[in-house]
Amino acid sequence: MNITKKILIMMIVVTVVMLSSAIVFASGEKGVKTIRVLTWSGYLEKDWVLDFEKENNCTFEITFIGSADEEWAKAMSSDGAYEIIVIDSSVIPRYYRAGLIQPIDLDKLKNMDNINPNIDFATYADFDGGRYGIPYTWGASPMAYNADIIKNRPTSWGILWDPKYKGRVSIRDDIYITWAMVGAYIGASDPWNPTPEENKVIEQKLRELHKNILTYYTGTTEGANLIASEEVLVMYAEATNQIHEARSKGANIRESIPDEGSPTWLDNFSIGSKAENLDLVHKFIDLAITPEWQGRIGETVGYGVAVPGAMEFMSPEMIELTHMDDPDYWKKLFLFQPVPDEEYERRLSVWNEIKAGM
């Protein structure tokens, strides 16, 4: 064999090796499937899925989001390529209309009977005969109050307007849940989508409430610090975990669900419209609605979970905080509902005017 042929053969061998390496690098370990998840912080940790990955020859790629707007943007840019998306019940219709999610095969979920029967699936997750969401966690937005100062549990949102507490009230800087809370307080026909006349009353009540507000908080810890420090005596809390955080600072902060009820979110597993590993996705969702898994979620995030059996794996303190042992608690809550984009933008404009004192 002459030198030219030897060089040619060596070049071919090197090229084949390089191409093989590139293919392995691009696709990862041979045969390993990737489960791409879009979810909220605290809902899924990498070490929780290590056993699942080993047993099923797969790997989880988890993307955390900090707001519903961020989640929507990421979901849209992926064009349905996330295998699992954890979304609130109120936006499932939006994701469905955008073609970002696909029906869930309920025959592949053996643990569906674990889910709280008080959660009405069909109301928010069924479209054209398909199911597009499986409940995961939930949480009310209750009233929080300083029980050392306010001795009797407030039974109405009306306390927020009481002149006695002027400058000692705080609410979250979130017009979506605040509009609904005020809607419930005035007895609107639908707190999420009131009539035009009811909307006028809500706007006026918000302007009146502004006079009592010390500040509009923007995060869980900020609100917890405010009410724990006694700067604020009564607050519209974003969730029960905020009350837990305030208590951890030594403050005697308690929760009240007023007679008018409280807005409540419900987060769900949905499956991306272009998800490829459907058997694995269904297998994981089925695992995530077992009592053991749900108990871990409840302990980690301090929210209610979809499976009552999770209480076996939760501390008494967390069960009390999340009201998992109170079957009547759900009767006082009303789930987040969709609000048309144009109406939301109108409310946001009003909200910004009110905060600016206009």
Image (cartoon, rainbow, N blue to C red):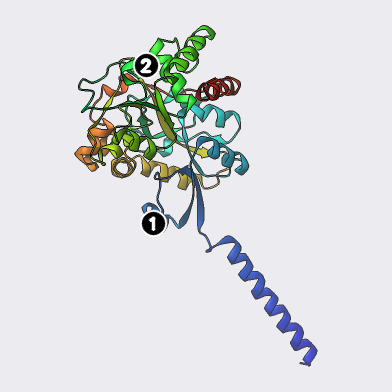
| Image point (52%, 60%), residue name | 31
Could you tell me which secondary element the residue under label 1 belongs to?
A: helix
State the image quarter where residue 234 is shown.
top left
Could you tell me which secondary element the residue under label 2 belongs to?
A: helix
For the C terminus, which image quadrant? top right
Q: Position of residue 86 (x, y in %)?
A: 46, 38
Question: Sequence order check: which comes first, mark 2 or mark 1?
Answer: 1
Q: Position of residue 306 (x, y in %)?
A: 34, 33
Name the one closer to the observer, 294 or 225.
225
| Image point (37%, 24%), residue name | 167
Closer mark to the observer between disc 2 and disc 1: 2
Kind of residue at disc 2: Trp
Kind of residue at disc 1: Leu
For the N terminus, which image quadrant? bottom right
- Do the CB atoms of the residues marked 2 and 1 lie less than 8 Å apart? no
Camera sees residue 14: yes
State the image quarter where residue 122 is shown.
top left
| Picture disc at residue 295 | none
Q: Position of residue 321 (x, y in %)?
A: 26, 34
Name the one closer to the observer, 138 or 104.
138
- List the single residue furthest toward the top: 197
Image vertical order of residue 179 relative to residue 222, above or below? above
Q: Residues within 10 Å of mark 1 (few under 14, many from 20)?
A: few
Q: Residues within 10 Å of mark 2 (few under 14, many from 20)?
A: some
| Picture disc at residue 50 | 1
Q: Is residue 323 left or right of residue 166?
A: left
Name the one closer to the observer, 241 or 200.
200
Q: Where is residue 59 in the image (x, y as percent from the top left)?
A: 47, 56
Q: In this view, does 264 lie to the left or right of 310?
A: right
* Residue matched to label 2: 161
